[in-house]
Image: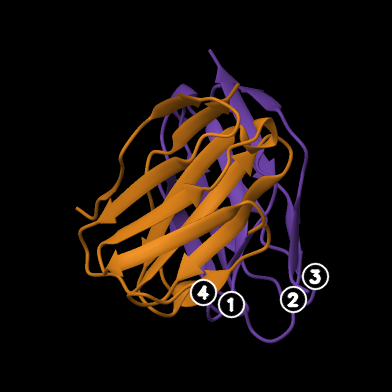
Chain colours: A purple, B orange
Amino acid sequence: GNSVTQMEGPVTLSEEAFLTINCTYTATGYPSLFWYVQYPGEGLQLLLKATKADDKGSNKGFEATYRKETTSFHLEKGSVQVSDSAVYFCVLGTASKLTFGTGTRLQVTL
Amino acid sequence: DVKVTQSSRYLVKRTGEKVFLECVQDMDHENMFWYRQDPGLGLRLIYFSYDVKMKEKGDIPEGYSVSREKKERFSLILESASTNQTSMYLCASSFRVTGRTEAFFGQGTRLTVV
């Protein structure tokens, strides 16, 4: 079956540091890939998505590229802010279902 | 703005009680979902519905049931609450082809069963 593996957290960074959160997946067919973010006390919201191989999703300074050859969708941001502190979920989508990674908590300090 | 509204943010119930969690969406989405979120386990799908009165089991349906009598409303029912059902419950909705489109989430209901 489909599965998503993302790096364990928590990840603690200083403001303006570079962020990478690794995500790899196992799937049959041609899934879409998403990153969702959950800010404290809130539900999940879509951060970015890519629907086919080599697509790059981007939003709010975050980027991720759908790499079919390495089955990866790593999340990156060049300079994190305190307001980016949240839990980030890598998600694989097929026609009728979303499969979630376990989430990575990011804590950004001044 | 799309809104998915869950009826309660926090609930405390006793073991053996019947518990209803309600979710309403205002975007005319066909699909609605119930997930539970536990530390280290991510989100796990309990049930989903792709149309009124239709439902499908997800990955962990045991101990739960659902009801969808109207398109905008999807209810999760714990027939006899147990302590291992203490968790965060998240409702979501989307247009029909879930895997290609954005899913919208409610703020969650933190349920404690004592």
Q: Quadrant of the C terminus of chain B?
A: top right
Residue A70, disc: 3
- Of residues A21 and B74, the one drawn nearer to the viewer in this rendering: B74
Confirm or deny contact between disc 4 and disc 1 (CB under 8 A): yes
- For image coordinates 51% across by 42% down, the residue present is B89
Q: What subunit carries mark 4?
A: B
Marks 2 and 3, how far apart at CA? 12 Å
Asked if both marks, 4 and 2, belong to the same chain, the answer given is: no
Is A45 left or right of A25, judged from the image as shown? left
Q: What subunit carries mark 3?
A: A
* Lower sequence index among marks 2 and 1: 2
Asked whether the viewer can see residue B65, the reply is yes
Mark 1: which amino acid?
A: Thr
Looking at the rendered structure, the secondary structure element under dot 4 is helix
Residue underneath mark 4 = B99
Residue underneath mark 2 = A27
Marks 4 and 1, how far apart at CA? 4 Å
Residue underneath mark 1 = A94
- Whole-percent x, y for residue A27 in the image: 74, 76
Mark toward the viewer: 1 or 3: 1
Mark 3, other Cα within 10 Å: few <14 / some 14–19 / many ≥20:
few
Marks 4 and 2, how far apart at CA? 13 Å
* Lower sequence index among marks 1 and 3: 3
Mark 4, other Cα within 10 Å: few <14 / some 14–19 / many ≥20:
many
Marks 4 and 3, how far apart at CA? 21 Å
Mark 3: which amino acid?
A: Thr
Q: Is residue B47 above or below residue B79?
A: below
Confirm or deny contact between disc 2 and disc 1 (CB under 8 A): yes
Mark 4: which amino acid?
A: Gly
